[in-house]
Amino acid sequence: MFLTVPYLILRRLRARREQVRGEIRYEPPPRPYRESNNDINRRQLLRRRRRRRIFPARISLSEIDEHDIKERYRLNSDVIMSLYELIKKDLISTTKRSNAVPGIVKLLCALHYFTSGSLQSHVAEAGGITQSTFSRALSEVISAILKLADQFIKFPSDTAGLQLVKQGFQGISGFPDVLGAVGCTHIAISPPSEMEQMYRNKKHYHSINVQIICDADMRILDVVSQCPGSTHDSSVLKESGIYDRFEKGEFDGWLLGDAGHGVKPWLLTPFEMPSTESEIRYNLSHSATYSVVERTIDVLKSRFRCLDNPNGVLLYNPEKVSKIILVCCIIHNIAVVKNIEVDLAQDLRPSIKDESTEDDTMEGTVQRDKVVAEYFSG
């Protein structure tokens, strides 16, 4: 009995101690739960379903009044749709994503940019697309329209076409056998840093010197749009393909040029100091006839303010600016053929006139004297 009692007490003490230990027993923290790939995909799918993408309303030609269409795009709806039919295969999106930008929206945004010269962000917002989307769409439209260059900008080579051009010019002021009037204009740009001085013109801003040859109806027959602003007008002409064709005697007729060129057998310029009544009459007729290229340039810049924006310059590299100029000339010719007129802008940059840096050729002087004697002697 004596031995039994302490033993029972000991067991009770041990049991109580184990009970206390059980109450404060250490338990390790639970391991973090790692989502399986299936859980992650399920969660992302639920999130997409909850989040509905909201797209801005995109521009629609059918929702714009015809008057507003002409004000914004300098073309009417029929001409825009005709142009779209020619290039739509290059503008239709090949992506399978929903809500892809329609080709007509890309064209309308590009036309708006050409005619307004506004910032990309403003044009994109007006068209209902993002700025990055507009940037891609603009490149697509430029590439598509450039494919039409041979169709809409070409110097006539057949006898009937050349004769029509001559008749058109002679109807202005009686000047005979004129196949085109050649003039230059400067398009302001932001120059590349490594060639900044090459693009600085004599008016001390950076530009591309663009040469245009047109007919009596202000239709552009030839364009050179890649020469830096420091290039002289006569040098631009020498770099053109049309120069070689006239030099080889391919055409029976001549171009009219201004004082920035030397007289040649196929390039007639005005007399610097006319000394006879015949030479004065020649100069007057030359001036009236030649002015068509000056009007053509003014109309081109008034229709496409990106080429002459009083609030800024074209902020692209010279290669892309050259393409934009050519695209504008193509659309200009389409507008001329469709008789789409435009009011002349009153804030165009003053023209830059070059003085001739080359001597008149003897053959050119003889040809000009012959024209004066035969047609302007009275």
Image (tube, grey):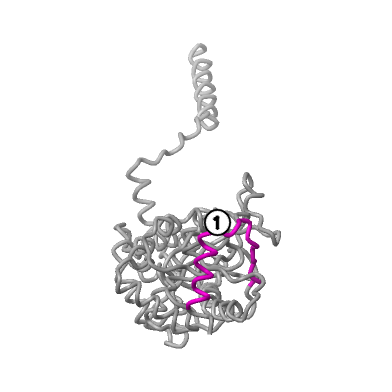
Q: Is residue 344 visible?
A: yes
Q: Position of residue 247 (x, y in %)?
A: 43, 56
What residue is shown at x 52% (from left), y 62% (from top)? Answer: 364
Looking at the rendering, which quadrant does residue 308 occupy?
Answer: bottom right
- Seen in the picture, residue 49 relative to 79 is either above or below; the reply is above
Q: Which residue is mark 1?
A: 316
Vertical side of 53 occupied by 239: above or below: above
The stretch drawn in magenta includes residue 285: no
Q: Percent from the top left, x then y, of residue 361? A: 55, 58
Q: Position of residue 350 (x, y in %)?
A: 66, 71
Q: What residue is shown at x 61% (from left), y 59% (from top)?
A: 207
User: Which contiguous range is marked in magenta?
Assistant: 349-374
Q: Amino acid at mark 1?
A: Tyr
Q: Is residue 367 magenta?
A: yes
Residue found at x 63% / y 60%: 356
Please identify the quarter of the rendering in which residue 189 is found. Answer: bottom right
Instruction: Tell me if residue 348 comes above or below residue 326 in the rendering.
Output: below
Determine the residue positioned at 34% across, 75% down: 163
Q: Nearer the viewer, residue 374 or 239?
A: 374
Indicate the position of residue 209 as horizontal and vertical percent values: 57, 60
